Amino acid sequence: MPKFLQEYSYWNMHPFLFSLFQKYISKDKKILDVWSWSGAWWKRLLDNEYQDIYLIDGFLDPDIPFDNFIKSDFTKNLPYEDSFFDAISCLEVIEHVENRYLLINEMLRALKKDGIIMISTPNIDTIIVGKIFFFLTGNLIGFTKKDGIFDTFPAHINPFYFPSVLAYYQDKIELVWIYYSVWKVPFFGWNIPFHNRYFWNTSIYILRKK
């Protein structure tokens, strides 16, 4: 097994994501990672004694022989029984999906009552990335036709505006907490000292199924 697997996230964000993940999800839980990418998140969980991990990816073949890996189009359905998982991680995924509600419906179906979903996605409310750039260009940074890491899956196509999602699922999910990742000023590399949605690059949502 390779010691390092490419993390497909902003600014090497997996350590920060894991610090949040372990606050809400204990090591004995059954976990699904949606869109497993290279397997870097799976390996981080495994290295920290999480054992009951399932992975699904519809676009990329894994670089290592995963246990409990399924190659399937997760944007249409998740091939698991109802109420099968205690927790689901959906990291840097939701903005790539054409029908986010179909995916969220499937995650909720496969999740047990009181189960946790962790979603990370570009924060479209930031002043520079969201407000100023959109005012000047009419586009959000990261949501243009030229974006994308590989040719085998779609680029950022669907900005995630959480208030509308929460309103739609108000009877099915509750917001536990919102976190914002470290953001650096372009070209200078300065860390922004304000920990709120207007200055930070990525939003992380901790959701609980009712």
Image: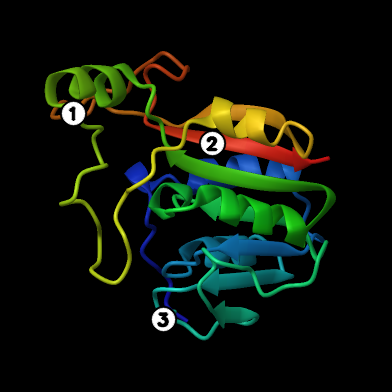
Mark 1 vs mark 3, CA separation in Å: 33 Å
Q: Residue at x 21, y 51 (%)?
A: 147
Viewed as shown, does residue 15 lie left or right of 59? right
Mark 2 belongs to which amino acid? Ile
| Residue 195 visible, this orientation | yes
149 lies above or below 130:
below
Q: In the rendering, at what x and y percent does residue 12 appear?
A: 37, 47
Mark 3 belongs to which amino acid? Asp
Q: Quadrant of residue 10?
A: top left
Mark 2 vs mark 3, CA separation in Å: 26 Å
Q: Residues within 10 Å of mark 1 (few under 14, many from 20)?
A: few
Q: Residue at x 59, y 28 (%)?
A: 178
Quarter containing the C terminus: top right
Q: How many numbered tags mark residues here? A: 3
Q: In the rendering, at what x and y percent does residue 139 appear?
A: 21, 32
- The residue wearing badge 1 is 186
Q: Quadrant of residue 134?
A: top left
Checking the image for residue 61, the label placed there is 3
Mark 1 vs mark 2, CA separation in Å: 21 Å
Q: In the rendering, at what x and y percent does residue 148 appear?
A: 24, 56
**Coloring basis for residues:** rainbow
162 lies above or below 9:
above
Comparing marks 1 and 2, which lies closer to the viewer?
2
Residue nearest the viewer, comparing 54 with 74: 74
Q: Are marks 1 and 3 in contact (CB under 8 Å)?
A: no
Secondary structure of residue under mark 2: strand
Secondary structure of residue under mark 3: loop
Mark 3 or mark 2, which is nearer the start of the sequence? 3
Mark 1 belongs to which amino acid? Pro
Q: Residues within 10 Å of mark 2 (few under 14, many from 20)?
A: many
- The residue wearing badge 2 is 204
Checking the image for residue 85, the label placed there is none
